[in-house]
Image (cartoon, rainbow, N blue to C red):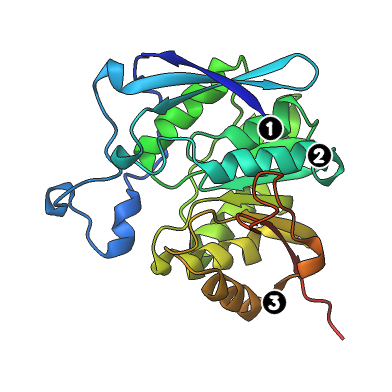
Amino acid sequence: AINCCYIRGSIMTNMNQDDDSNWREYNIHGTDDDADQPFDIFASSTDDDAYETIQYDIDNNITINIRSEKDYDKSTGMSVWKGSEVMCTYLRQNSDVVNNKKVLELGAGCGLCGLVCRMALEAESVLITDGDHQVMKNLRYNVELNGLQLADAATLKSSNATISCPQLIWGKNHAIKFAEQYGKQDVLVATDCLYISQSVYPLFETANELLEKTGLFLFVNSYPWVCPTEMVLDIATEFGFVSSDDELWYHDDDREKRKNPVHVFRRRKEV
């Protein structure tokens, strides 16, 4: 497992990109007004004591720092969830999957997986994305916290900068526009980013538009009672994605109970 320790306290910054929309993740429910939310689970705290910095010790003396909120019930995108740690262990043990590849993390939250791909696994380029504009502030903070320079679409293609944090709202139309700027990707990564059934279809619409024909979509859902695995697999099939049982990967802690597998989605081969 990845070793980690915690440093309490941090300060929220106001970093943002001018072209971000004000989209919030709860807009999936069909409302656009913060005031309509009886309890905003996506709210970012303004209390410095609400944050902690987690230090992950990776191979080759690499340390990755992630700022997150301490309480899971305050935000989905502002905390590190189990699925991302499972995925990072998978990636470290299967580094060839992302080595010299173009990688995009969907619904990245705090950005742990994307940072591991960039800092420890020598991905060619990494796009760490989320839709919620409040989550994006902390996500970009985490990239710069680790000494990395953020690039925009033009810089990513024309310089040695290899990491960017553009906003990506799921859905076909958004994904088409995103692909026009950033191109298609070799590997997509998504972990614990499905908390309501309405999110599953837009996720695979997005994956369908952004993944190269021979690419891989790596997916972990460690809370399958929220979005059942059967539903995810059925919708994946609608878009021509298949996950073979032979490629399911389990963390050592979960193998005996066959929990929290990494699904390796590939496009179905045309006959």
Residue drawn 66% across the image and 44% down it: 253
| Residue 67 located left or right of residue 183 | left
Residue that mark 2 sits on: 93
| Residue 40 located left or right of residue 54 | left
Q: Secondary structure at mark 3?
A: loop
Residue that mark 1 sits on: 1
Q: CA distance from mark 3 to mark 1?
A: 33 Å
Residue that mark 3 sits on: 240
> Relative to 156, does residue 250 appear above or below in the rendering?
below
Q: CA distance from mark 1 to mark 2?
A: 11 Å
Q: Secondary structure at mark 1?
A: loop
The image quadrant where one finds the C terminus is bottom right
Q: Is residue 155 visible?
A: no
Q: Position of residue 71 (x, y in %)?
A: 33, 33
Indicate which disc, 3 or 2, sits on the residue closer to the N terminus. Answer: 2
Q: Nearer the viewer, mark 3 or mark 2?
A: 2
Q: Position of residue 224 (x, y in %)?
A: 50, 62
